[in-house]
């Protein structure tokens, strides 16, 4: 059960990180249009967003594994 709660918390935290990375990318794109950022800044921001997205996916996989482990432990389908 605790693994499920932990994974759910990780998913929520990953969503926040992903949204922050998305906003940072949008900001850097605006700065690029204004001549205040470089293409490298955009690539870095895109990389950050991709990493945040992958962390969210990993957290979701952890949730599925925790759910399957709990079902195996109790011997019944719960989810």
Image (cartoon, rainbow, N blue to C red):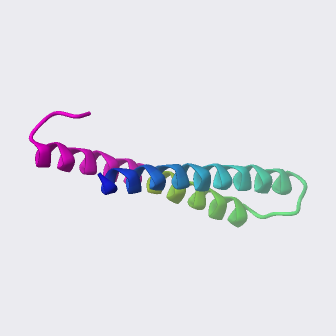
Residue pictured at 59% horizontal, 52% vertical: 18
Please determine whether, in this image, residue 37 is positioned above or below residue 76.
Answer: below
Residue pictured at 85% horizontal, 51% vertical: 33
How far across and down, in percent of the image, does residue 54 sit? 45, 54
Residue extending farthest left? 75
Asked whether residue 71 is drawn in magenta, I would say yes
Residue pictured at 85% horizontal, 56% vertical: 31
In the picture, measured across the screen, residue 72 lies left or right of residue 31, that is left
Please determine whether, in this image, residue 68 is positioned above or below residue 32.
Answer: above
How far across and down, in percent of the image, does residue 61 sit? 32, 49
Residue extending farthest right? 34
Q: Nearer the viewer, residue 79 or 52?
A: 79
Look at the image and tell me whether residue 57 can be seen.
yes
How far across and down, in percent of the image, does residue 73 sit? 12, 49
In the picture, measured across the screen, residue 1 lies left or right of residue 38, that is left
Quadrant in which the C terminus appears: top left
Q: Nearer the viewer, residue 16 or 50?
A: 16
How far across and down, in percent of the image, does residue 17 sit? 60, 56
Give the quadrant of residue 41.
Answer: bottom right
Residue pictured at 47% horizontal, 53% vertical: 9
Magenta range is 57-79
Q: Main secondary structure of the magenta part?
A: helix
Asked whether residue 36 is drawn in magenta, I would say no
In the picture, measured across the screen, residue 7 lies left or right of residue 50, that is left
Give the quadrant of residue 24.
Answer: bottom right
Look at the image and tell me whether residue 56 can be seen.
no
């Amino acid at each position: 059960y605790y693994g499920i709660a932990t994974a759910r918390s990780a998913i929520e935290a990953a969503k926040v990180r992903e949204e922050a990375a998305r906003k940072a990318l949008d900001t850097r794109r605006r700065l690029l249009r204004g001549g205040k950022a470089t293409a490298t800044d955009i690539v870095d921001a895109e990389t950050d967003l991709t990493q945040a997205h992958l962390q969210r996916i990993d957290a979701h996989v952890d949730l599925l594994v925790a759910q399957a482990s709990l079902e195996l432990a109790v011997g019944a389908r719960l989810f």
